[in-house]
Image: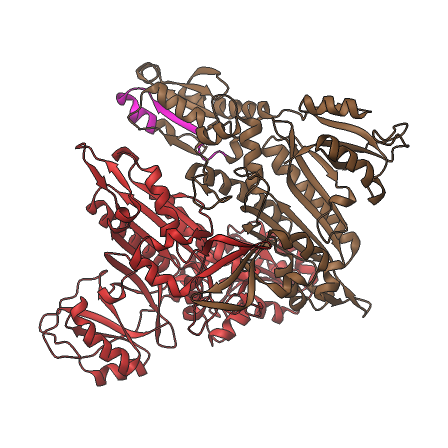
Chain colours: A brown, B red
Amino acid sequence: MYDELLEKGDVVDIRYPAKGFIVVKPWGMRIIKHLYREFEDLLEEDGHHPVHFPAVIPEDNLRKEGEHFKGFESEVFWITRAGLKELQKKLILRPTSETAIYPMFALWIKGHSDLPVKVYLSEAVWRYETKATRPLIRGREFLWIETHDAFRTHEDAHAQVLKDLEIATKVIKELLKLDFIMVRRPDWDRFAGAEYTYAIDVLLPDGKVLQIATTHNLGQKFAKVFDIKFMDKDEQEKYVHQTCFGIGIYRILASIIYIHGDEVGLRLPSAVAPVQVAVIPVKPEAEEYAKEISKDIPYRTEVDLSQKSPGNKFFYWDKKGVPAKVVVGPKEMQEGTVTISMRTGEKITVPREKMVQVLSEKIKEYDEGLFKPIAIKDVSSLDELEQAIKEKKVARAGFCSISEEGKQCYQVIKEKFNAEVRGERIDIQESPEGMKCLVCGKEAKHVVYIAKQY
Amino acid sequence: MYDELLEKGDVVDIRYPAKGFIVVKPWGMRIIKHLYREFEDLLEEDGHHPVHFPAVIPEDNLRKEGEHFKGFESEVFWITRAGLKELQKKLILRPTSETAIYPMFALWIKGHSDLPVKVYLSEAVWRYETKATRPLIRGREFLWIETHDAFRTHEDAHAQVLKDLEIATKVIKELLKLDFIMVRRPDWDRFAGAEYTYAIDVLLPDGKVLQIATTHNLGQKFAKVFDIKFMDKDEQEKYVHQTCFGIGIYRILASIIYIHGDEVGLRLPSAVAPVQVAVIPVKPEAEEYAKEISKDIPYRTEVDLSQKSPGNKFFYWDKKGVPAKVVVGPKEMQEGTVTISMRTGEKITVPREKMVQVLSEKIKEYDEGLFKPIAIKDVSSLDELEQAIKEKKVARAGFCSISEEGKQCYQVIKEKFNAEVRGERIDIQESPEGMKCLVCGKEAKHVVYIAKQY
């Protein structure tokens, strides 16, 4: 189903001759550019500025933070030669940019008036994935946004983590109409080097969850390793508090395709549809009328002047996920009307003067109609968990602990079902009162969500 | 001078611990984002679509076009290891994307109705430069745009090359106010694999020219190597005709900084200034008034609420190259006026109601004032050429030939002055009638431009 949707939507080409690397075709890249812009606008509003950092990191930098290096050692690409020469100082392709950026932060930050520093990168990273790869979901190169922030206090850093989640919610839920669970990850599943990790998971139709964004409070750990200090108001030299936020642009695109798509093809949220309205003349003599009315439409519009039959034109734009088609033929020309044909199948003929208003209402309805809440099933035993997994739902259960002491119970779940404890919800408050851990039966300290993951 | 400007403008950081790689700081990256958007908008208007191609190219691909491989062999970075494993199939970091893209074109293009294909990438490339590097001018990583187009006929390809130059002119000359010479490169200086290369050179204040954009007619050479064929209207299978166009975003930024900058700092063309108008309250009690009037300003505006003295605020925004400052204090508040203070030093106090109109006029004047024609000197002997180079001008001279047969004369110039024959002008027609080659004294077939280059 997913692979068919990629094909129908003409989103990517998976035939690039290097394993795990894909080409993003024009339609896919146009969606991605809108995704970037939506996130970047909100990040900039929140005081982030764009920066560019090199794609390569000297080996020494990566090695500096031990836990971080261990987390990435087995999955980085190494540049060992340049031209015809062996490099004395080897370089890695960045798998994420902490160890590229933080040595520069140490140079940039001197006093409290330099803080906060809030920057973002909209670029690719590379990881040598050895698990099975899947286009846009898991690959050896992916496009994302990473923000890196430094603050005076721990509270400022925590507030940023919450702000990051607010930005993610605005785009992912409100614009893209993707439901998700927002959780604090168990301690065994934190980002290498973070104090705590908050993450956003969507549920794909095959029953597996996909992490599409994460924000980390890094505390002062990296600051100490990279010596990022500032003179505070009280004349004391202190380490900064840091956060970083990863927005998986590829994975969000994958989610739009897989979750919203249907048997016909893509169904794109209007916010990121490269073409929001396709204007389709069904006869050559309607082409001028089509061009004329297209000028009135305050959406990203394309007039389809191809030689295809009307049916093939409809099919083409439906596959590509365009929200609305405005269809005009001799009848509409004579009547001074247009026929609005939505991706949902709904059709309505309206006078030309009403077109813009009706389009706006119908596109809004269409967007709302895309939203479908995540299927969640309460479970209180491993049998019930198995059932939830079979039903392709996310299981909600009592759990003894998401600190290290709960790891044993997690490992039972991992071994039996190859499933993951995704963590404790943070977008809503849930009390574990009266619940037991579904594995050990001890009193539950957390309500957690469990599912297989990508 | 240039290094000071980079520092004053806070554009890049050259302390990144890998030689030849630089960090672009927020102010620099914000300018770059505007540069990208100006070019991309025109490219899209001309029917180009964005795509993403992997940063890595399998060795085999690069090797396919022999001349092209020879051109890049000594300057590519090699990825030989992944994780803890030697790679069986080595990868290179793309130095340019022809050999990544064209195998995919072979898969995408079947019939004449698939043509033209016109795509662009806005991404980084990597070249192992062994010459002295200079920030934004010559480095081991740079940001650019590359377009890759395929056409039915040679005429279509040639028309695209001209269209590319038109787009470059619109942005570089009309918006960015940079004068340039547009030339056909001599045959010994063509892009590896191209039929002919047209290029745009600016003249930097140190007397060297810098190539900031090039467009190439690749003919059918790559098409034959990568087997990019289509079924034409006449039922014959034919090879496509290709062009590619490189827009050096880093180098254009360098040119803006170096050519427009003065002893104070940057002077940014308003089109790409991240802040076009800085609103400066000179006393805390004017802050509210400053915020209020800033809402009326239809430009990218920032209100400077920092704790700095008024003088330091002026200095800060002047260094960063912001075209206009709107200054308000108790006097302006009382009178209901604002003081417009331009980067040129011009100052004028106007009633609030007139602010927008005057700003618009003054910013237009400011932009026009940035333009300064390239200094060109006619020469007819090697002595005169030496003099032109000393005067930091581009020399214009008669030249025997820009085909291979002129290479000997070129080599004399290269050896004596380390200068380059940039080629024959194509934006204006110049007749060599009555001129002699400044080296061999034979009848001149071309009027060429000669200068040292970066």
Residue at left offset 31%, top offset 70%: B374
Residue B404 appears left or right of B105: left
Query: For residue B331, what is the image quadrant?
Result: bottom right
Query: For residue B177, what is the image quadrant?
Result: bottom left
Residue B40 point in image, percent of width and height: 41, 48
| Number of numbered labels in the structure image | 0
Residue A256 point in image, percent of width and height: 55, 32
Depth check: give the residue in front, A104 or B125: B125
Residue B379 point in image, percent of width and height: 20, 79
- Above or below residue A144? Residue A322 is above
- Above or below residue B34? Residue A138 is above
Depth check: give the residue in front, B314 or B382: B382
Q: Residue furthest bottom?
A: B383
Look at the image and say whether residue A280 sits in the magenta stretch: yes
Residue at left offset 63%, top offset 68%: B310
The stretch in magenta equals: A273-291
Look at the image and say whether residue A299 sits in the magenta stretch: no
Residue B322 point in image, percent of width and height: 51, 63
Residue at left offset 16%, top offset 66%: B430
